[in-house]
Structure formats: C-alpha cells, structure tokens
Amino acid sequence: MAGLAERYAAALYELADEGKALDRVASDLRSLAKALDESADLTRLIRSPVLGRHEQGRAVKAILDKMGADALTAKFLGLVAQNRRLFALPAMIKAYLAELARRRGEIAAEVTSAVPLSAAQAEAVTASLRQAVGAKVSVETRVDPSLLGGMVVRVGSRMVDSSLKTKLQKMELAMKGLG
C-alpha cells in the first residue's frame, strides 16, 4: 500500500505545486487526518468495502464542503473515491506531508500525546526537536488518550517513547520477573 499512497501523494503534490496550492492542500489534509483520528465513523466510511464508490464519493464531498476544502483537494479525493482507493487515504496524507517537508528541507516529526498540546507546549517541543536534529522540523501532533501521560516522538526511523503507558508496561514486566 505504501507504493500506492506515495504515487497518489506525488501526483497531488505536483498538481498542488502547479496550482500554487501546496499549503492549502496540506492544511486540508491535516484537517482530514485529524478528523480520521477523531471519528471512527469516518474511518469506517473510507475502509468499507460495502459502500460503493458513488456513496463514498458523495460522503467525502459533503465532508470536504463542510470543511471548506480547496477545490484541488476536493477533486483529488473525488478521484481517489472513484478509483476505490479511500482505504489508503491515511497513508496518502502522510506521504504528501512527508514529501512537502522533504522538498522544503524540513525533517518530518510526529508527536503523539495523551492530551492535546497547548500552543506553548507545541512550540517548546518543536524548538527541542529543531535543536536535537539540527534542521528545520515539521511537527505533526496527534492525541492518543491510551498513553495516559507523556508523549511518543517519531523523527524518521527514530522513536522516543516517554509515555506513562510504556513505563507501566515495563514496570509490569519487571515485576513479573521478580515473582
């Protein structure tokens, strides 16, 4: 699926670059990714083999209209729905944002926290990552309440997990070793 997502993302990037809509499309895709993270119904919609391409296309169009998405984003997602490729949408979004960051000379980082980060916290994390990596950093934030506390930071293939969930799991394993 990665190859499929990357091809679609590359095509969208080229169209957005020609139309000088790179940032508008990126904003639309970030909003859509956030909606996918927050809505199990939306996730079911894009993954459902039961719904036909027309139903999925109409539903996605309605969502994008309500979001006020750019025309290019709407056309692109209409094509993705028509081609029955909505199941790969999360990977397409990730690939587009990664390509955008790469072409701008930024390093993409993903920060997952238990609760939404405030603007000051997000800026502090971005500054820390910029200092650690030594380059411009594009940070995508996600919320996963199952972490309980702390955060998980992914930069490229590296991951730092300081979540309370992981610390409790490690403690549980250590306690089992003692018994």
Image (cartoon, rainbow, N blue to C red):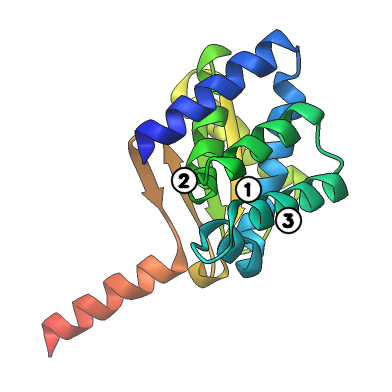
Cα separation, mark 3 vs mark 1, equals: 16 Å
Residue plotted at (75% across, 19% down): 21
Q: Which mark is residue 59?
A: 3
Cα separation, mark 2 vs mark 3, equals: 33 Å
Find residue 45 and report its horizontal and vertical position in percent: 61, 62
Q: Secondary structure at mark 2?
A: strand
Q: Which mark is residue 43?
A: none
Q: Quadrant of residue 136?
A: top right
- Residue under numbered circle 1: 33
Residue placed most toward the observer, 5 or 22: 5
Q: Residue 34: in sight, yes or no?
A: yes
Give the side of residue 33 with respect to residue 172, left or right: right
Q: Which class describes the residues within 10 Å of circle 2: few (<14), some (14-19), or many (20+)?
A: many
Residue plotted at (70% across, 20% down): 22
Q: Which class describes the residues within 10 Å of circle 3: few (<14), some (14-19), or many (20+)?
A: some
Residue plotted at (12% across, 90% down): 179
Q: Quadrant of residue 16?
A: top right
Residue placed most toward the observer, 170 or 105: 105
Residues marked 1 and 2 touching at CB (< 8 Å): no
Circle nearer the viewer, 2 or 3:
3
Q: Amino acid at mark 3?
A: Ala
Find residue 62 and report its horizontal and vertical position in percent: 81, 52
Residues marked 3 and 1 touching at CB (< 8 Å): no
Q: Amino acid at mark 1?
A: Ala
Find residue 60 and report its horizontal and vertical position in percent: 71, 50
Q: Secondary structure at mark 3?
A: helix
Badge 1 or badge 2: first in the primary sequence: 1
- Residue under numbered circle 2: 153
Find residue 27 and report its horizontal and vertical position in percent: 73, 34
